[in-house]
Amino acid sequence: MAILRSTVVRQAAARLAPAASPSVVLSSIPRTAPDCTITRQPPVLVGPDCPTPRQSLYLSNIDDQLGTRYHVPKLLFYRNDFSKKKHVEDPVSVIKEALAKVLVHYYPFAGRLRDADNGKLTVDCTGEGVLFVEADADISLEEFGDLYPPIPRGDDFINNVTGSESITNSPLLLIQVTRLRCGGFVLGLRSNHCMSDGVGIAQFVNALSEMARGAARHAVPPVWNREILRPREKPTVKFPHHEYDQPTPDEYKQLISRPEEMTIKSFFFGSRDIEALKRHVEGSQCTTFEALSACLWQSRTKALNLPADQDLRLLFALNARSRFQPPLPKGYYGNAISFACAEAKARDLTHQPLSFVVELIKEAKRKIDEEYVRSAIDMMEVKGRPHFAVGGSYIITDLSKVEYAKADFGWGQAVYGGFTSGVAPGVSNFSVPLMKNFHGIVAPVCLPPIPMENFEEIVSRAIN
């Protein structure tokens, strides 16, 4: 097992067989931010290119819970594919024109969120439009090197427009298209999480790309219908929802380190690493997500050296669309996530085998059915849509199967599509990187410096 730390990552990678998903297994790779100048034009509002309904739309409790009230930035990187006829066209003009077309069908995005009674939010379909920024960068795609979160200088390619950061009374989308020196481009998109989850925003981006390629209609027509997830007339909380438990103020101080104490590293897991982890799980098959999540949760707990009787949680968002009977309609682009919650004492996480942790994760997944999700919706109705549990929690989101990068605007699919950062204290996101000679999954991790050193050693031992 090797941990790559030097600046000669490419040379080290080149010595490995690319098809084998190298047994380097875990890499902690330092990068330098690209040296470039980005020139932006003033932001403009792009609205639907024909009249759309003027109405107020309901948001479900899953949509506007406290834990979704933020903006989510994503980046998609595109090459200038000379085999495509679009390569001679201007991506800024193509995407801007397509945006006006797609907003006819996804017109709620052109509106604004408003405060409503009892702490709820509603969508005011004003047709005002979304923010659009045209930009140029004096850098080629190749100069970025390997692409995986956190993307160096990623925020520069989805730059905040002053005054647009509010959740209410602000544009619900911000799109920045940045031309690169090589003819490629970067599409930056910041979306209000109250409008869509990852699957929903990927659907929107793919619909936008269809319009850019000249499609007359969408392959998957959008479905709003947030009323399908309304709470029951008599809210019925049938399950304990520990995913929304909150620590006391004193417990919170003990569990959360200050951001200035943190260091961030991205860890790469190739196919051999994942298979090695799965071999540690005795008695049952497990998925890649289950094996990686168990390894990271267990290793993080050991690295932090927490008190043995500390109650800990692993939270992970599950796409609940197919867990309803019947499933939610195809094209539903709202939030349809449910937080699965695995729980254990620190002593069990540190002393039990990996198979024990995998079984905790499997059991948490098995609980998520329609009745559990509706119980959570009713719980939020009763308790005012609380924030999901943060203190004592490790939160993982699996973006490796969310198809952002499949969006083809006429220049081929994106070479990378995902979060700019994907990491915060107690949060990690799995994603598929663009790395020469490496094929696998990247998980950014945020820990204090000394636990980070411990974490590297523990994960290395777990794989080897």
Image (tube, rainbow, N blue to C red):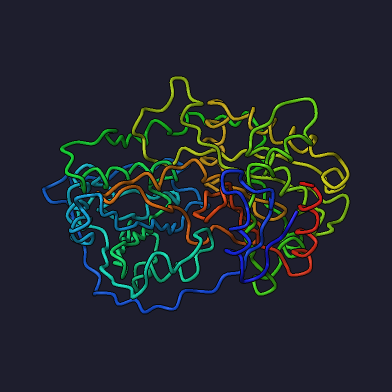
Classify residue 405 as left or right of residue 305: left
Spot the residue most to the top. Answer: 326
User: Is residue 273 positioned above or below 279 on the image?
Assistant: below
How many numbered marks, from 0 up? 0
Instruction: Decide which of 165, 238 is in the foreground and name it.
Output: 165
Q: Position of residue 123 (x, y in %)?
A: 31, 49
Q: Position of residue 352 (x, y in %)?
A: 86, 40
User: Is residue 437 positioned above or below 11 on the image?
Assistant: above
Residue at 34%, 59% in the rendered image: 187
Residue at 60%, 64% in the rendered image: 11
Residue at 36%, 35% in the rendered image: 332
Q: Position of residue 453 (x, y in %)?
A: 77, 65
- Quadrant of res 295: top right
Classify residue 143 as left or right of residue 297: left
Classify residue 172 as left or right of residue 147: left
Instruction: Decide which of 442, 230 is in the foreground and name it.
Output: 442
- Quadrant of res 229: top left
Classify residue 48 as left or right of residue 178: left
User: Is residue 377 positioned above or below 25 on the image?
Assistant: above
Instruction: Decide which of 328, 301 is in the foreground and name it.
Output: 301
Q: Position of residue 24 (x, y in %)?
A: 69, 53
Residue at 37%, 39% in the rendered image: 333
- Quadrant of res 286: top right
